[in-house]
Image (cartoon, rainbow, N blue to C red):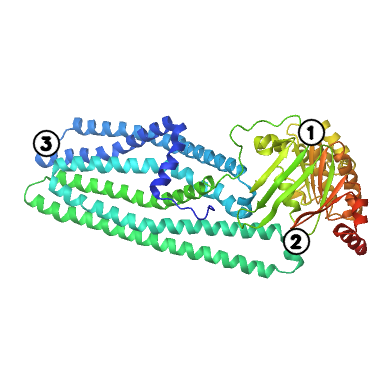
Amino acid sequence: MTMEEKTYTTRELGRRFLRYFGPYRGTLALDLTCAALTSVCEIVLPLLIRQITNTAQEDVALLSARMIGGFAAVYFVLRIVDAGANYYMANIGHVMGARIETDMRADAYAHLQQLSNTYFNNTKVGQIMGRITNDLFDVTEFAHHCPEEFFIAGLKILFSFCILARIDLILTITVFLFVPLMTIVCIRINRYVKQNFARQRQQIGELNARIEDSLLGQKVVKAFANEEMENARFAEGNQEFLEIKKRTYRIMGYFSTSTRIFDGLMYLAVMVCGGYFLMDGKILPGDMVAFVLYVTTLLATIRRIIEFTEQFQRGMTGIERFLQIMDADIEIFDEPGAKELREVSGNIRFENVSFEYPDDHNQVFHNLYLDIHAGEKVAVVGPSGGGKTTLCNLIPRFYDVTGGNIFLDGRNIREFTLKSLRRNIGMVQQDVYLFSGTVYENIAYGKPGASLEEVREAAKRAGADEFIKMLKDGYNTYVGERGVKLSGGQKQRLSIARVFLKNPPIIILDEATSALDNESEYAVARSLDELARGRTTLTIAHRLSSIRNADRIMVLTEEGIVEEGNHETLMEKKGMYYHFYEMANEWK
């Protein structure tokens, strides 16, 4: 199931999110204690005013400076406590929310590292980025305010009801009858708010993906003079986002209006019923004042909850989109009892291997057999779509076979941990990926923590040291995003240096020179020959001139391996390899 397909109930979202409070139970408990203390002032003030008013109504002479001063002193102390509690909530409480956000982002990132190529093939990077950045920004406020707001609201409603019920139960019930009605209306409207916030998140993810796609392909956009088309496509998505927000705010408008109507009805109930009760002498003027003050406090609390609703729904939507990442299936994983792969010779065997891509069920192999001996240089050629790159991806388990087995040194590769298996395989691909950083950092990626001398030695063996020293800052030169400041040949030699530094016993070269010019190809080919020396090497190549010296060449088609032998043997057969080779010479 893709992450867009999975939805959750509010209860499930809350239950799954609760575990992130676990490490901060002490902080949360103190935060809620502070929240309770901040509520004391609002709960006590109407009682003090009621006492003063009723005393004055009974006999103003009973009012004394000592009484008023005592009440003032109590209220002043409560305000000092309120200020300290509020500071803790605003500071430490928010930090707790930020820590929870950080924990969730770390979990999401770690989970993403375990997901297979299939997931990333079917999910836009912009959507993923939105989920682990923007969507989790709102979780900080949600994690902090959600427990606080509902805890405070619960306290105020409970204590207000208890205090007012002691004054007059009938008037209290009359006023509080509106609370469940307001709650029902809010819950019904909230469902639509949540749906629209989810659409907002989805659409902003689409916008992110569109922006990323356009900016990364800006050279193509300019080459085809399609700036206006890109602007139009972006404007369409941007306008759709605006329409979603307009619908959301229209629903929020209904929400706000309905609560204001209930506000008026509650004040009206106090005014009418309280007035009649005063006439009948059932309550005193101070009681009436207390009712008005408590209703004001109650309505202020409800308004805060209403204002928090938007933040609540943003937070719940962010949690839902986070869980959609966390619940994405890990398809490639360590089998129970998997062991570390050590002392690799490099014998690779495909035995009755079948494979189809899990997302579209496109079958690539069926009952494929292949043996690669330790230290052997094997090249694979064939038409596009024959499965050459897929063959490379199966050895380090970027995908798992759907039938048969792959063995390394006589043991099924599933018996080894993924990390140790991949640590012993070096890959050089046509599409070189360099990280945004320095030359040194990109080479050292092959062996984290490598010294500058180790990096230089790897660069020399890859034929890269000479051009690196000519760069402005040498090994400290910033290569730009995806290495845009370097040529194709330079980037490829850095990727080879990275593998030299890794020093694996098995090398996979996936069309490593096909995108290079002749001069760069020659320089890189020398580096690859050096890299392959003494290692089991599997080379995928379009340029057949680069594999003439391979120990064995195999022609792979949709029918499997149809030809096998060295260059001279296959040329003598005058079969498919001969046809490819002659056709390549004609194009020169």
Q: In front: 334, or 472?
A: 334
Q: Amino acid at mark 3?
A: Ala
Disc number placed over residue 555 in the picture, else none: none
- The residue that label 2 is drawn on is 219
Residue displayed at 27% across by 47% down: 298
Q: Nearer the viewer, residue 272 or 552?
A: 552
* Mark 3 Cα-neighbour bin, 10 Å: few <14, some 14–19, many ≥20: few
SS type, badge 3:
helix
Residue closer to the observer: 300 or 242: 242
Residues at discs 2 and 1 in contact (Cβ within 8 Å): no
The disc, 2 or 1, on the residue closer to the chain's N-terminal end is 2
Label pair 2/3, CB-CB below 8 angstroms: no
Which badge, 3 or 1, comes first in the chain's sequence? Answer: 3
Quote the CA–CA distance across marks 3 and 1. 103 Å
Tell whether 20 sits left or right of 180.
right
Which comes sooner in the sequence, label 2 or label 3? 3
Regarding mark 1 in the picture, which secondary structure is present there?
Answer: loop
Residue highlighted by disc 3: 61
Amino acid, disc 1 = Ser
Q: Nearer the viewer, mark 2 or mark 1?
A: 1
The amino acid marked with disc number 2 is: Lys
Mark 2 to mark 1 CA distance (whole Å): 45 Å
Q: Nearer the viewer, mark 2 or mark 3?
A: 2
The residue positioned farthest toward the left in the image shown? 280
Front position among marks 3 and 1 = 1
Residue bearing mark 1: 345
| Residue at image point 21% right, 34% down | 68
Question: What residue is at 38 percent from the left and 40 percent from the top?
Answer: 147
Is there any visible trace of residue 94 in the rendered image? yes
Residue 355 placement (x, y as % from top left): 67, 51
Query: Measured from the top left, where is residue 419 in percent x and y?
Result: 67, 36
